[in-house]
Image (cartoon, helix red, strand yellow):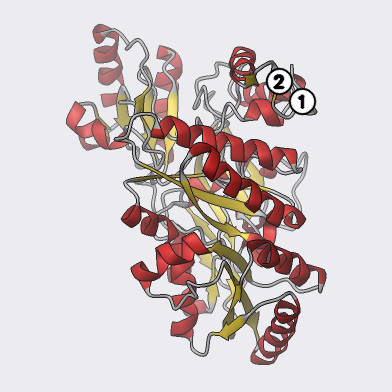
Amino acid sequence: MAEHNMNPVATADRKTLVRALAQVLPAHALLHSEEEIRPYECDGLTAYRQLPLLVCLPENEAQILAILQICRRFNVPVVPRGAGTGLSGGAMPMAQGIVLSTAKLNRILTIDAHARTAKVQPGVRNLAISDAVAPHGLYYAPDPSSQIACTIGGNVAENSGGVHCLKYGLTLHNVLRVRLLTMEGEVLEVGSEALDSPGFDLLPLVIGSEGMLGIVTEVTVKLVPKPQLARVIMASFDDVVQGAQAVADVIAAGIIPAGLEMMDQTSSQMVEPFVQAGYDTAAAAILLCESDGTPAEVEEEIARMSEVLRNAGARRIAVSATEDERLRFWSGRKNAFPAAGRISPDYYCMDGTIPRKRLGEVLLGIAAMEKTYGLRCANVFHAGDGNLHPLIMFDANQPGEFERAEQFGAAILELCVEVGGTITGEHGVGIEKIQSMCVQFTRSELDTFFAVKRAFDPAMLLNPDKAIPTLHRCAEYGRLHVRQGQLRFPELPRF
């Protein structure tokens, strides 16, 4: 596994920095011994690790402002961190920088059941919001698989989704307002609790910015009424292309399910012994299609979806009869990642998005890549919006397997771009996909991204070297992809 190495800050400077931070933080909120900072060496992308210079655990906004002021004075980079569940290395530390964790800002500040909003601090867990507002018959819709642990601040940074994002949207569609602090110490409030806000709409810019524009200190989220009933169809197909076409057929029929997920046979056979969800492990692919609403609405939609799926070639259709069975059907999909850990020493979870109509083509392409790279891949994804999560399984103890897994992942992302998609859906770019950005965007587009970054952070100290590749990096990546004088995907713009 790789560790990023940078020349460390001189010992004397580090001591001065510690003394300065100790003036604004209580002792328990400033970690600097190796034993204390070791847990922060990586996020969910554990293949890359780096010990930070220090870790700060502020307990309020004033302390965050003071930390940023000190780091600006010392020219020290700041890497924001939530729960550390991110999968793209967005919270990986820098040897010369500090990690600023918002984990202690974990209060739900207000709940307005009439307006259906909640104002929360960034360290509040995703699932904790739904638990807190359940007595009002409400919940927070985005439900990433890590919702039991991931925080709202991290969800904002990565624009997280979940299995119900097709109908209810991503974080972007469920956040009304964000309060954040820039590296310059400016307090910004973007968005509004009203239907619109004055000035440029900066909320979509901040959500998904991967901690590069500011430190989130407060988020106002939208709540939705808990549906009276929800039921799930599990449909089995003998062919993955047939299953993928069924996804397009459901949407083409004018149906927007609450959730529309797909798993290939490798995934269902991997998951079933782990959670006993009742999956058809003999099927080449299974679809999970959820309907929610009033009992009458659900009954009608389930009937319509079942008809579409049968016409698309489903050989078996099972519908959840109870709430426990519905949750069991979803438990398999939500536990795909830990299930992979039971059958493979290591796995690499990718994240790309493609047009729904190209699902079958891309799945066949991934199957061909399994032979090329000599590695297995389990496919689980948000089929309704084309967000793929291939799980590449490998053994890091075998020489060269990790490198092959990375190459396999990069090839999947290039295929996503080739068919008109993008290199990420909800995991972010971080350090994991930074080289693939060179395939997706032109130099002028990347320069525009840098210009936006400088507008918020002129010193480039906030989560630097993430998400946006430099010209040098793109040039190096381009050279790596020349094979026998032929550049892969020559129709894509290069610079």
Circles 1 and 2 in contact, beta carbons < 8 Å? yes
Work out whether 305 lies above or below 147: below
Q: Amino acid at mark 1?
A: Pro
Please name whichever residue, 78 or 348, is drawn nearer the observer in this view of the structure. 348
Marker disc for residue 430 = none
**Residue at numbered disc 1:** 490
Task: Give the quadrant of residue 486.
Answer: top right
Q: At numbered mark 2, what does the secondary structure look like: helix, strand or loop?
A: strand
* Residue 68 can be seen, yes or no: yes
For the C terminus, which image quadrant?
A: top right
* Residue 153 can be seen, yes or no: no
Please name whichever residue, 50 or 173, is drawn nearer the observer in this view of the structure. 50
**Residue at numbered disc 2:** 486
Please name whichever residue, 137 or 295, is drawn nearer the observer in this view of the structure. 295
Horizontal and vertical percent position of residue 25: 29, 32
Horizontal and vertical percent position of residue 104: 34, 46
